Amino acid sequence: MSAPPPLPALLSREDLRAAVAAGVLSEAQAARLVALADSRRGAREGLSPDDEPFELFRGFNEVFVVTGLAILVAGWTGLAALWIAGAAVSPGFGGLVGRSLLVAAAGGTLVWALAEYFVRRRRMVFPAIALSAIWGANALWGWTAALSHPVMVAAGDWTSLLAPLGLATASIGLFWLRFRVPFALALGALGLFATALVGAASAAGSPEGIGELFVLSGQGPFAAVTLVLGLAVFAAAMAFDLSDPYRVTRRSAQAFWLHLVAAPALVNTIALTLLAEGTAAAHALLGLFLALIALVAVVIDRRSFLVAGVAHAVALAGAVFGGGAASLTVLALGAALLALGAGWERLRARLLRALAPLLPLRRLPPAG
């Protein structure tokens, strides 16, 4: 299958005026195109066609707004903590749980109202990320206060956390459905992981099970969970990517954040399973697996997927090996990343030509 044709040169405003005069576009449509181009230019200006777009904020005003949000949340949290703690002295309205739920409900209402303005109306990127995180934390707090049992958790029984985690994840999903913030989708994926992992720990019947999260083995309760969910999140990321090969819509940003979640999950399961073997053959297989991760990242043109996976592999190497072995592993991974960064476009073009009969090239970003 042939590769997609290159994008045409950017349309000028004279082209848009001619399109309006010819009846191809309405004046309102042309105005919306100009506004969209202006809003994206800050992040895309000077970006190589072969580079992976990434946008954290569009200007310092967004940093200014997030600073205000951080101060607002700090003040709100302090006042709420004092009011909730007052339930121990004078129970009054609702007691500890009642006050916690009221604070969570009021906080959620405030965050939603702020998101309506800064996300839906102003289309700000950095405030959207911050508000997603605040919404998720507030939802987790509210549902945990309502449904969890601290005594059970202190005793190592995680069962009462399943419902709060699941409902908090659903709340994040509701936020994403309304505002379509890519970062919120990643938070929802992390919520699914947390819910599934706590469920696995509870089903294993071992209070210490949750501590095995970073020391997986082939028989551990978390191995299958992280592998299956990692593949599912990766599939969701690819669905977004394949629907936007030129990466000009928000679907590309949704995929970006999902890749950052999927890669560590896949590397965590496979790498720790092989590292647990402790043999030269297992270490060689780990090297081949990381090479496969790099191959996939180059083909789909997602440096974020590779960086997230390799960063997690570096952390695992330090935790498992330690000393000189860890340093050698980190040195090799760093050298490999630098080599890929220097020759990414050339390598990708060659790979796509070699694998052209096997790949849906029209749904992948074109090679330079």
Image (spheres, rainbow, N blue to C red):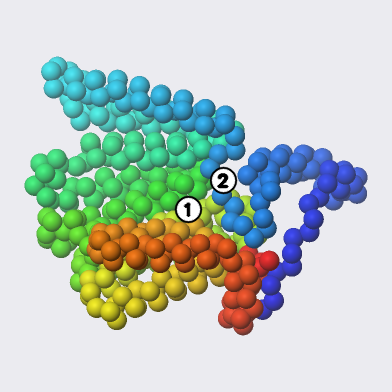
Q: Nearer the viewer, residue 87 or 324?
A: 324
The Cα atoms of the two marked residues, 1 and 2, are separated by 11 Å
Q: Look at the picture and state if 259 lies above or below 300.
A: above
Residue 204 sits in quarter: bottom left
Question: Is residue 5 left or right of 270 when viewed as pictured?
Answer: right
Q: At 23% from the left edge and 55% from the top edge, which residue is drawn? A: 198
How many tags in the picture? 2
Could you tell me residue 317's position as x and y percent?
Answer: 30, 63
Residue type, label 1: Trp
- Whichever of callouts 1 and 2 sits on the residue coming sooner in the sequence is 2
Which numbered marker is on residue 55?
Answer: 2
Question: Which quarter of the figure is the N terminus placed in?
Answer: bottom right
Which numbered marker is on residue 156?
Answer: none
Question: Is residue 57 left or right of 88 when viewed as pictured?
Answer: right
Residue type, label 2: Glu
Q: At 78% from the left edge and 52% from the top edge, which residue is drawn? A: 10
Q: Nearer the viewer, residue 130 or 189?
A: 130
Label 2: state its secondary structure.
loop
Q: Are marks 1 and 2 in contact (CB under 8 Å)?
A: no
Query: Few, some or many C-alpha atoms within 10 Å of disc 1 (few <14, some 14-19, many ≥20)?
Result: many
Residue where numbered disc 1 is placed = 257
Q: Look at the picture and state if 280 lies above or below 51.
A: below
